Image (cartoon, rainbow, N blue to C red):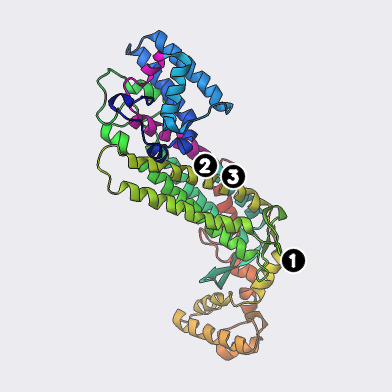
Amino acid sequence: MSKLWGGRFTKETNKLVEEFTASISFDQKLAKEDIAGSLAHVQMLGECGIIPLEDADKIKEGLLEIKTMVDQNEVEFLVEDEDIHMNIEKLLIEKIGPVGGKLHTGRSRNDQVATDMHLYLRTKTTELIKLLEDVQGALLVQAKENIHTLIPGYTHLQRAQPVSFAHHLMAYFWMFERDKERLIDSLKRVNWLPLGAGALAGTTFPIKRERVAELLGFETIYPNSMDAVSDRDFILEFLSIGSIIMTHISRLSEELVIWSSQEFQFVELDDSFCTGSSIMPQKKNPDVPELLRGKTGRTYGNLIGLLTVLKGLPLAYNKDLQEDKEGMFDTVETLEGSLMLLAPMIESMTVNKDIMRKAINNDFSNATDIADYLVRKGLPFREAHEVIGKIVLYSIQQQKFLLDLSFEEYQEFSSLFEEDIYEVLSPEHVVAVRNSFGGTSPEQVEQQIKLAESKLGK
């Protein structure tokens, strides 16, 4: 039989079965990780005397040659060899002869593939943390330039109170900071070594899993062999974190789409991050944030897909687990592409400060400050709230805003009003007096930015 496992079989694998069950079309992404795991494994086999040292050295030389071929895209992976593990092992045997078959001593594809994915996610998680920091850095650049830029703050997408634009942007900084912390924490689970668990029950050979862990930089070894080969929690956790990251990217993207619309015009995205219309020459479409928003659904689907695969699986390894990889790869690539685009798009956007300020002048987002003003004069808040509601209704009927009303008009609603009401209602004052920790005052925003810079080590 042509298969490395074909000794027990009397017939060749049906071609449709071969194509259906093969994973090489996607798990070839794990080639470098598979070789790294094999190098550590064979080093340990030689040191433990499980195979002769000269055989171990020959296998290592062969694996390094294959790694060079992989790096230079000189390897043609074959469907008939099923997966990345069998492809590399077959290449090794072709290159160095039957001694290459000793590499698989004391391990199974079950613990091998799990190790590959741990190695892959460890690398990608570290890279994604850096990409998140790039986005945070871009938000900081814009925030530092817009501490005194005022924008309407919204609840229910209705204007609520004016805020510093920097304060608004920094909300996303802290979302991404939590995402970063989640990724950092997840590394504790990613950094568990499955290799040495065998197919499910361990091995009869006197292996030293601690030595493999040391060579590969793993901090923890799975203490249960059945758990080691069937655990995909670390991928579930990554897909969950990835979905949360994309949720935050999507929320920010939605704001960029709204802010850059003709109705708002709060920001203008750089031409390099927009596209035009094939029929309407005046259009400048925010395709990048729209697509970032749309790609969020992919990451949700990948998470739900793996949850569904795992929910009914008995221990230990089952072929269903082959379905863990494509969603993981897709989420990694979606996150990488999204974060790499998001950082420069934020940093290069133009903030239309005058239009933002005009929007604040033409709304009632300073109404709460009148209520606070009356409360300080001794009026119970509920009564003050009713007074302000009547003032706003009157202003709408008169087609005026609160700063347009005369002092006499204010006096008609309450004798507690004095001339200082106009100072209280100025947008700068409204923002400045919200000076509680985490508030939107310039002083608090500057402190927030300093704290954020310390998080990035700047």
**Does the magenta segment cover residue 117?**
yes
Residue 335's spot in the image, x, y percent? 52, 47
Which of marks 3 and 1 precedes in the sequence?
A: 3
Which of marks 3 and 2 precedes in the sequence?
A: 2
> Given the image, on which type of amino acid does mark 2 rest?
Leu
CB atoms of marks 2 and 1 within 8 Å = no
Q: Quadrant of residue 218?
A: top left
Which image quarter holds the N terminus? top left
Q: Real-space Cα distance between discs 2 and 3?
A: 10 Å
| Residue under label 1 | 282
Please say if 167 is above or below 15: below
| Residue under label 2 | 128
CB atoms of marks 1 and 3 within 8 Å = no
> Given the image, on which type of amino acid does mark 1 rest?
Gln
Viewer-side residue, 66 vs 207: 66
- How crowded pointer 3 is (Cα within 10 Å; few <14, some 14-19, many 20+) is rated as some
For numbered disc 3, what is the local secondary structure? helix
For numbered disc 1, what is the local secondary structure? loop
> Given the image, on which type of amino acid does mark 3 rest?
Asp
Residue 387's spot in the image, x, y percent? 52, 85
Q: Which residues are magenta?
A: 98-127
Q: Which mark is residue 134?
A: 3
